[in-house]
């Protein structure tokens, strides 16, 4: 009996629409691993897009973009709706991920607070809403390292079970999860700094965080393929 190749099935995945022989570079998964590499029966392309790690971040990104001292309640509602919409397929399958659960709980609590508590008692939330959101997602991501890295929950949907316990699969997802947690932690700290400086807030609130997000996306696509190539090399 052939033994599993421990170099396959490394990171969070996203698409499985084409057969392995016809998978072009543009059809790589978010982690950089083609569905053909996994040699598994993966869900449909749309299911995987819905459950991709990037859509898992979408409610938080929506909140960051929309939230301001006068709009944070609407931002929380928009993020909550997005979290519900993106999580419907998982709820139907009985599968629930830590990132999705955190999104639903956090934005529901923020929205209810906005409705039930007097504005004067929520001035701290108006000031720190975006920083708080980034801090919470950083804690969720980094905290998941103590159990199951959150990117691994996405990767398992399209990677055969026999690869889940391989060292490369586990290590790759731990690194990806730590990287994403670090990005949001730095973004939260930049938000705190922006509240205390007189100039440069656009750089701290927008330019640097967006650059970090783009870099994180590129790293997530590049790193698993790089590790796999090294292991085979």
Image: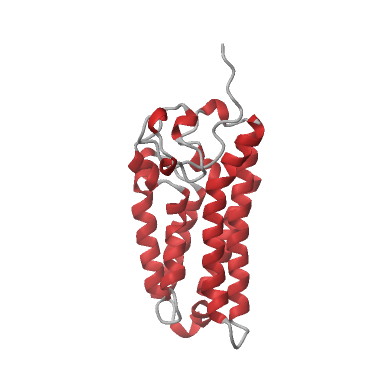
Placement of 61 over or under 166, stated as above or below? below
Residue 83 rendering spot, x and y as whole percentages? 39, 56
Where's the C terminus, which quadrant?
top right
Residue 152 image offset from top left, x and y in percent: 55, 41
Return the residue nearer the eye: 174 or 113. 174
Q: Is residue 100 above or below residue 186?
A: above
Q: Which residue is depicted at the point 49% across and 42% down?
A: 154
Tell me, yes or no, if residue 138 can be seen here.
yes
| x and y percentages locating residue 190 in the rendered image | 61, 73
* Residue for point 43% across, 75% down: 72
Q: How are the colours assigned in the image?
A: secondary structure
| As drawn, 152 above or below 184 | above
Which residue is the extreme one toward the bottom? 198
Asked whether the viewer can see residue 112, the reply is no
Please count the marks in the image: 0
Looking at the image, residue 125 sits to the left or right of residue 22; the answer is right
Percent of width and height locating residue 49: 38, 46
Residue 22: name its quadrant: top left
Closest to the observer, 135 or 159:
159
Q: Dividing the picture into quarters, in which one does residue 138 lie?
A: bottom right
Residue located 63% across and 59% down the image: 182
Looking at the image, residue 52 sits to the left or right of residue 181; the answer is left
Q: Quadrant of residue 24?
A: top left
Figure quadrant of the N terminus: top right
């Amino acid at each position: 009996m052939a033994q599993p190749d421990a170099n396959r099935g490394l990171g969070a995945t996203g698409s499985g629409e084409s057969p392995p022989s016809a998978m072009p570079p543009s059809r790589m998964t978010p982690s950089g691993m083609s569905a053909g590499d996994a040699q598994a029966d993966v869900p449909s392309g749309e299911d995987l897009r819905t459950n991709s790690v990037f859509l898992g971040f979408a409610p938080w990104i929506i909140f960051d973009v929309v939230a301001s001292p006068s709009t944070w309640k609407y931002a929380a509602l928009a993020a909550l709706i997005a979290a519900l919409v993106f999580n419907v397929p998982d709820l139907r399958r009985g599968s629930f991920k830590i990132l999705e659960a955190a999104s639903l709980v956090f934005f529901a609590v923020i929205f209810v607070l906005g409705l039930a508590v007097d504005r004067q008692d929520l001035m701290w939330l108006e000031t720190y809403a975006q920083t708080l959101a980034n801090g919470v997602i950083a804690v969720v991501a980094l905290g998941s390292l103590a159990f199951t890295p959150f990117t691994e929950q996405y990767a398992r949907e399209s990677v055969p079970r026999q690869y889940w316990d391989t060292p490369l699969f586990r290590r790759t997802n731990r690194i990806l999860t730590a990287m994403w947690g670090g990005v949001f932690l730095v973004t939260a700290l930049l938000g705190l700094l922006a509240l205390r400086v007189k100039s440069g807030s656009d750089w701290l609130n927008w330019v640097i965080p967006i650059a970090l997000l783009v870099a994180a996306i590129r790293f997530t696509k590049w790193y698993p393929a790089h590790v796999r190539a090294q292991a085979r090399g």
